Image (cartoon, rainbow, N blue to C red):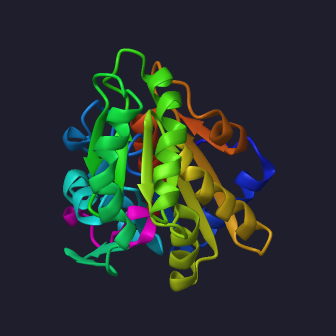
Amino acid sequence: MVVPATEAGRDGLRVILGTPLEAVVALDFDGTLAPIVADPARARAHPGVVGALRGLAPVVGGLVVVTGRPAGVAAEYGGFDAVPGLVVLGHYGAERWEDGLVTAPEVHPGVAGVRAALPGTLERVGAPEGTWVEDKGRSVAVHTRRTAAPEEALELLRAPVGELAAEYGLVVEPGRLVLELRPPGVDKGAALTAFLQERGARAVLYAGDDLGDVAAFSAVEKLRGQGTAGLLVCAGAVGDAPVRELADRADVVVDGPEGVVELLAALGESLRGR
């Protein structure tokens, strides 16, 4: 097993190993379980993910994937129907996939307004060629990864996209070369906290790689102060430095989805050997 760099992380790992049936393993999807790709529709979990999760399923108190994607899409792309008991909290917790079924409240009315207005906004501000819009159903995302200068394009669009979101009662969640317009009051931190309370967890391992995971990191840090042990994992990527804010706050930094798989497999092997 990897040795966490912080005392809080070492304590989190100790509690997870000591009382695994009272521990939850929580994971982001894109960049953490699945490599980042230019077209999100082509993202699939790393080949070792399902095996590593199946090894953990019987020996921990809960497995949950917390993602900005629709819950059913993440479950399909991850092959999670092969992992007993795994739950997917999609759209930052607004949707829940469990046992092959998705449950969710009604879609925020502002999403329809943004969906209709966004093309005109992008044209008005001169969004560069390669900018494209992903309709997630409960949110809408603007990607700049395919443009000639992705970072510059993102900065060009940040203010007008933020203004449009506010007009329709939505908020903007920034990520790797993407601006996602989604309902307020929904984030990975709130979703994770609610799931841990539901399971009565004494400890949690959370792994993420992007700005959307900052809220989950903050939630774990807050829960530590309330007596829940936590292990924070930042998933970097070969040739792509991990988000600095996550890396600086993480107890463990691993090398992208491959590193996450190795960590999960080692954790499962250690727990099954007890």
Is 115 inside the magenta-drawn segment? no
Look at 65% across and 33% down and name the residue there: 244
Q: Residue, x 67% and y 39% (percent of image)?
A: 245
Q: Position of residue 70 (x, y in %)?
A: 29, 61
Q: Magenta residues, as a range?
A: 80-94
| Residue at image point 42% right, 66% down | 64
Q: Is residue 180 left or right of residue 194?
A: left
Q: Residue at x 49, y 21 (%)?
A: 152
Position of 237 relative to 168 (above/below): above
Q: Quadrant of residue 37?
A: top left
Q: Give the quarter of the figure containing the N terminus.
A: top right
Q: How many marks?
A: 0
Q: Left or right of 209: which side holds 53?
A: left
The percent position of residue 114, horizontal first and vertical second, equals 35, 56
Q: Position of residue 69 (x, y in %)?
A: 33, 56
Residue lying farthest front? 124
Between 91 and 254, the one nearer to me in the picture? 91
Seen in the picture, residue 20 relative to 56 is either above or below; the reply is below
Residue 176 visible in the current orientation? yes
Does 196 sit left or right of 104 as displayed? right
Camera-side residue of 40 and 109: 109
110 vs 246, left or right, is left
Is 174 or 125 nearer to us in this picture? 125
Q: Is residue 173 visible?
A: no
Residue farthest to the top, as pictured? 148
Q: Position of residue 78 (x, y in %)?
A: 25, 53
